[in-house]
Image (cartoon, rainbow, N blue to C red):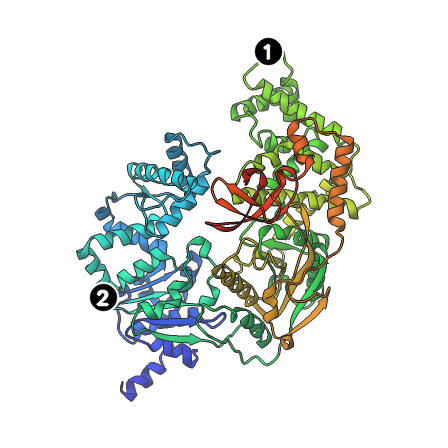
Amino acid sequence: MSGDLLTLMQGSAALSGLNDTQRGAVLHSEGPLLVLAGAGSGKTRVITHRIAHLVRELQVAPWQILAVTFSNKAASEMRHRVGELLGAQAADLWLGTFHRTGLRMLRSFGQHGGLASGFTIYDRDDQKKMLKRAMAALNISDQRLKPKVVANFIDRAKNQLKGPDAVTSRDPTSALCAQVYSRYEADMKIAGAVDFGDLLMRPVQILQAEPTLMQMWSGRFKYILVDEFQDTNHAQMQLLQLLSSEHRNLCVVGDDDQSIYSWRGADVSNILDFPKRFEGARVVKLERNYRSTAQILAASGAIVSQNASRHAKTLWTDQKDGSPVHLHGSNTDLDEARWVVGRIGEARVAEPLSEMAIFYRTNSQSRVLEDALRSARIPYVVIGGLRFYDRAEVKDGLGYLKLVVNPDDTAAWLRVVNTPRRGIGKKLVERVADFAAIKQISMPEAARQLSVVKESFRGQKHLKAFTELMAQMRADVATKSADTAGVMILRHSGLIDALSQDPSIEAESRLDNLNQLVSALTDYTENHADTSLGGYLEQVSLVTDIDKLDKTVDAVSLMTMHAAKGLEFNQTFVCGLERNLMPHGNIDDEAGIEEERRLLYVAMTRARKRMYLTYARRRQRFNEVLTQTISPFLAAIPRDAMVRTGQQHQGWGAPVRGPSSRKQAWARAAQKEQKTNPPRTSEEVAIQRGPVGPFLPGSRARHVSFGEGEVLAREGHGKLARVTIRFHRVGVKKVLARFLQAL
């Protein structure tokens, strides 16, 4: 390369503002390139400036460049940045998400795979309808097999490029899913439709089956760039290999330390094995961090460096000042939430709330944090999920509470009258609405009157049963405190029974949220002079009004660690750092443990200036107050990078012991219900007798889907009892005891 040309290139806009390592990645012209971009190292700048360099300096036609990312937001941002560098030429780039790229390819050559030119793309709701239709044709009820389970099965299969004939059935559930998959695909073909999985699988299958087409498309793109490469799955990797097979100019940018989506099909080996798969690949490491302080980098780096399967890298910064990472231990999760909110209250004097965030491992952890923020009148927003009181099952529970307190609450009646299903369908509800309009009365009152008219009609007995149920609830809890009343109402509503009969992970999460609602009622009763159910509902209503007023106001962000990916804040709180939450209790293999470390690393590297790590000695989970131990991951943090306050742990991961006032409060509420309201049915007797079956630690049990395994732990009572089991085939799972057979 001549000196004049080098000078010209170094002075170009494509290279301005880059450090030496970034510039090296941008200037790489031929052959495969792996850019290991650490958190906050400016990876988007490298991709956009590399595209500009290819077009402006190397005279590559924009339409010969394919740039792929994972989200529409990221693609839009990338297109905007490239547009600033290239102007109108940016419009000719092939730039978009993997699914958008697959769609464009199928529009071009989908007929080779039997697709009509005007095929339709079905979203998740459309797919669910087609799955239900296929299941009905096979006489498989959604009580026997949930459509969402089948949808996940099909999605995993297509990520692995497996059609209906290629999937294997290892258990009864997967065998049923395979049957539905086959029928579903036949119905989709008749409908002339594809789903999101097809947008990745079908282009690969067509290119592999059509050598001439494959040759044309592998020569079309001279340069391919991929963002967030650590999140690619098998189908995406195969597509990239096919498209880059002729020119081999594949540039992938990512960070194996931030690979946290294996549950979506992401395969971290794609980035770990890239140098092996692409012989002669150049590896560039972006290790200079422009986001965080040295203390934050030292703490987060020390944790992720414990992983054996990773590309070695050490992030650094030239920022001289910074606060040590703060580790705080609390006695309970309530104390933890109050402490976090206290620090936010102090910091908001000098820091906008929008620059503060709270991260947690599971959605159910947000409840105590939300309540503490509400009590302090600090506005917040839940990112990537619903506020606790906006979740469907929580709204259902509150609906019953409201209807007990106010028998004429039409909105509450509409929400719960057929939840869970009790034979009161749309037509019957419309009849009640018409009667209410004629009589000028509330819908609950109309239902009460219609349930006793002499002229019988279809559904009258169901309407009468529901009316009598609500009347009985109202009488039973008339003099009870909020916590006791809440326990009684939720149990007799049928919500808990309905979710207990559903073995899915989603149902377990919803049950946990209902248990969190009971915990909120208990907390209210213990901390307010007015312990009535009406008082609690009034507080919740006032809070909701405040939330609405604060929607346009500066607010704290709450989110799971997974949702935090790609974001950054001046001050962050990473909460619930205890064993069974971090790492999660369902993880029992080394690959899973390493991904949990990466997840914590992602959460920690969101902070720019200050980071707080918190844990609690006792935490409410699954209707129990559990004694917790501190996350063993934290032992790796250098002592000089961290200060510790609050409850001191007994060694890293050592157990702590002591009584639990919240557990005792729950027990008192349940005992009061048993004394004043003896169970009326055999099912209620079973609920109050305690755990279902023996299932003692060390014993063995069988699950219809997961097979046999060894019992590790048991928690909860009655239909809410859960058992943690190490299954031979699928590892550690927590399942409802009622779905197990003791061996």
Residue 418 lies, in percent from the top left, at 57, 29
Question: What mark, if any, has residue 556 been given in the picture?
Answer: none
Residue 724 lies, in percent from the top left, at 57, 48
Q: Foreground residue, 287 or 569? A: 287
Q: Amino acid at mark 1?
A: Glu
Label 1 SS: loop
Residue extending farthest to the top is 454
In the rendered view, tell whether residue 358 sits above or below residue 131: below
The number of callouts visible is 2
Mark 2 Cα-neighbour bin, 10 Å: few <14, some 14–19, many ≥20: some
Visible residue check, residue 609: no
| In this rendering, position of residue 416 left or right of residue 262 | right
Q: Amino acid at mark 2?
A: Glu
User: Residue at position x 63%, y 18% from top?
Assistant: 451
Label 2 SS: loop
Q: Quadrant of residue 31?
A: bottom left
Q: Quadrant of residue 639?
A: bottom right
Judging by the rendered image, the residue that carries numbered circle 2 is 246
The disc, 2 or 1, on the residue closer to the chain's N-terminal end is 2
Q: CA distance from mark 2 to mark 1?
A: 79 Å
Mark 1 Cα-neighbour bin, 10 Å: few <14, some 14–19, many ≥20: few
Residue 523 lies, in percent from the top left, at 74, 47
Q: Quadrant of the C terminus?
A: top right
Judging by the rendered image, the residue that carries numbered circle 1 is 455
